[in-house]
Amino acid sequence: MIGWKSPTFMYEGNMASFNPRTKSHVSLMFHTGASIPGDHPRLEGGGDTARYMKFSDLADVESGRDDLAAIVKSWCDSR
């Protein structure tokens, strides 16, 4: 779906959205990233709710694939 003018992924609620405004990297915002169970060192942010995963280029996307899959799995399992 398109929400907040950006591609948004959903599973029993809003999971993550791409930030279309970033220019130097790709930013994937997990709406409730602070509450995703487990240790996910690639999630950035210190607020009460959202966390971000950034990718600088295609090689970074490839190297972060397993981390992203683990984050999504933890998020879905917690629902």
Image (spheres, helix red, strand yellow):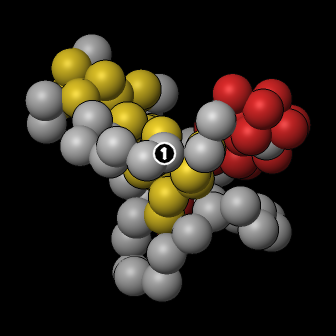
Q: Residue at x 57, y 69 (%)?
A: 44
| Quadrant that contains the C terminus | top right
- Residue found at the far left of this picture: 5
Left or right: 20 in relation to 24: left
Quarter occupied by the N terminus: top left
- What residue is at 32 percent from the left and 46 percent from the top? 22
For image coordinates 48% across by 63% down, the residue present is: 51
Residue at left 48%, top 83%?
Answer: 46
Q: Nearer the viewer, residue 61 or 29?
A: 61
Q: Nearer the viewer, residue 15 or 78?
A: 15
Q: Is residue 13 above or below residue 42?
A: above
Front residue of 43/72: it is: 43
What is the quadrant of residue 49 in the picture?
bottom left
Q: Amino acid at mark 1?
A: His
- Residue 42 location, quadrant: bottom right
Left/right placement of residue 20 relative to residue 45 reads left
Visible residue check, residue 73: no
**What secondary structure is found at the residue carrying circle 1?**
loop
Q: Position of residue 72 (x, y in %)?
A: 66, 38
Residue 21 visible in the shown view: yes
Where residue 15 sits in the image (x, y, percent)?
Answer: 44, 39
- Name the quadrant containing residue 2: top left
